[in-house]
Amino acid sequence: AATHRGGACTMTRPRAMLAGDDPSADPLLSCLAAIRAPPRELETAPRTADGSRLLCKRFCRADGGSCERPDCPDAHVPIAQRQTCWTFDRYGVCAREEARRADPKAPRCWFPHPVPPPAAHHIALQVEVGMSDRVVSRCRELLGPDAVVGAARADLSRNGDALVLVTAGGRGVANAARILAADSHLAARIKRAYVTGDERNPSEPGERNERGGHSAEGGGGVLFADASVVGDDADALDDALRSKLASLVDAALGSAEKEKDSSSGPARVRVRCFPPRLRDVVIEALRTRDDAPGEAAGNWETCARVDDATHALDVVAARGRAHVAAWSLINDDGPDSLRASLMDAGEAARKAMTDAGAVCRAFHKIEEATHRAGVVVDPTWRCVDVGAAPGGWTQWLSARLDVDRGGVVFAVDPAELGVFVGKEDGCLPPNVTHLKMRGEDAVEAVLDAYRPDPCPVDFIACDANVSPTEATGIVSSFVPALKRGATLVLTFKDATKGYAEWRRQMESATETLTAAGFETPRIFHLFSNRSREKTLVATFGGGRDGRDDDARGATGGKEVREEDAEASSRKASRDADGARLLLARSLAVFATMPGEFAEAHIKARGFAPPPNGSVRLMRGRLLKILSDEVIAESSWHAS
């Protein structure tokens, strides 16, 4: 890994990428991409803000002092007149500031950190950086394409946390939070959700909202939201919070306390901060207010436990601006409350995933994929799970199928399956058949189990640990066995030589599946996927509808002959599909064949390889030679 000046570690390979894998496509979210060092010219030849003159490095290094050169040709200008800090502008965090937190004697950043105007966001989601791209995508699916208005980082570390800033979009804070919390897979990945704004007063961020309690409209219990505390650097922001925070909390809770019975005691405030280092500053600011002579104490106090609190105070710092919000926890403990959505949903979702008794992580992958795609498994479906071991997808499917109504799962994998919950004796559920063979070899076994039905399969899943091209080949071999309308769930894993090859194979595999008859393919980067793993869900548009069997009766020899002719036609269609699949696999071999292998095959057949030919020419020459051989052999058989 490379290292920034100041000691912050950077990444040499992206861990999280935005939609389209192009961080520059969305400047608001550029901070979520891989950390990169500033352009070299900014370090070696810094300039003034207008770019007209070079900065004197000695003057910058002296932090406002003199460079001691009376004839210095470079600019001696204050920090505000220099070009902005590239790292702060892109990531919202400065490497030199991070170094100063570890060592107060470290030099300050030479460049200004301009604070952007406050954005109209109402909820901030704290997530891992590696999960942030998926959180952004899901928030936009649930709340609309304009729901995410910005992002920020806690630090420049690879495994740090990030903030995703979300606007309620006219729904109200409580309703927006409820929509996000309803997706258990999203909620499980959110470490903490903060209130950053009150939608009742979007144009007046400092105006206090005195309506307490929970409401489905407007802010839904948000008493106060303020974004006026700013600082040019981390130290200045901390000082501003120390001087202003107590008065903001007094303004937020003052009128609320007047409405309460005085016998109930002061308001008890639970403080939540981002980044975590800000908590010490906030607690110091609040305690300083209690200790200050002449201050009115007693109307509120801080507490450590959420269950003891009457109010929550969220302080979120992003890009030099602190967003302060207070919201009520009184009479706000129902399942649809703001507290349930912002505080309790994540823990409840993580506990539910743990209690599910999944045999492996893949259990949650197929659960999430079907939920995102709106697929409901019918209890009567005949399913095939290719690459089943250790059995997560098979476990999830078998729990939704009724063996008495014909619902079964064929688990295809040479390896043994794990132990399912409730089957500690090692036996599989009665609706699971384990075929210990490769996926390509299992097609006939599935067809034989349901003859004379030529298309018995309603659902096919493949989570095999192979490349997208190989996984597509396995799925394509099952095409003759699929009913019209059958569902496909397929994982694209990065079992390739590099990220670019993985992307290329995913695009090629999607085109191949579409050509094979799979309609409306949708690719998801699930929360249950790894960083380089995506899941495709599609519907098969070919084949035959299984309900045709019930509508068809025995009406005589003519119908039998028609059925025989139709069966022969289907067999010919399956043979043609097999031939096309064989051709596709052969072409895939050619597409990846090294040039020296192609040259050896050309020479072995008595031909001369193309002089100074590229790898592509070698492959093309060999393909032409083999095609001529096949055509010659076909002509001999025809004669």
Image: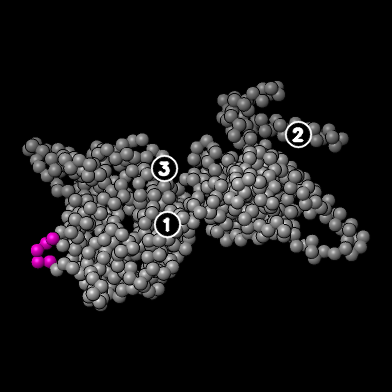
- For the stretch drawn in magenta, the main secondary structure is loop
Q: Residue at x 74, y 47 (%)?
A: 446
Q: Which residues are magenta?
A: 291-295
Spatial CA span between label 1 and label 3: 29 Å
Work out whether 557 lies above or below 388: below
Look at mark 3 in the image and give the residue it sits on: 14
Disc with the residue nearer the chain's start (1 vs 3) = 3
- Residue 460's label in the rendered image is none
Q: Secondary structure at mark 2?
A: helix
Q: How many marks?
A: 3
Q: Tell me the amino acid under the disc marked 3.
A: Pro
Q: Return the disc, 2 or 3, that comes first in the chain's sequence.
A: 3
Locate the N terminus and report the quarter of the image it occupies. Answer: top left
Q: Determine which residue is flagged by label 1.
A: 347
Q: Quadrant of residue 382?
A: bottom right
Instruction: Kindly identify the amino acid type of the residue bearing the numbered disc 1.
Output: Glu
Cβ atoms under marks 1 and 2 closer than 8 Å: no
Residue on which disc 2 sits: 630
Above or below for 619 versus 284? above
Q: Position of residue 525 (x, y in %)?
A: 50, 51
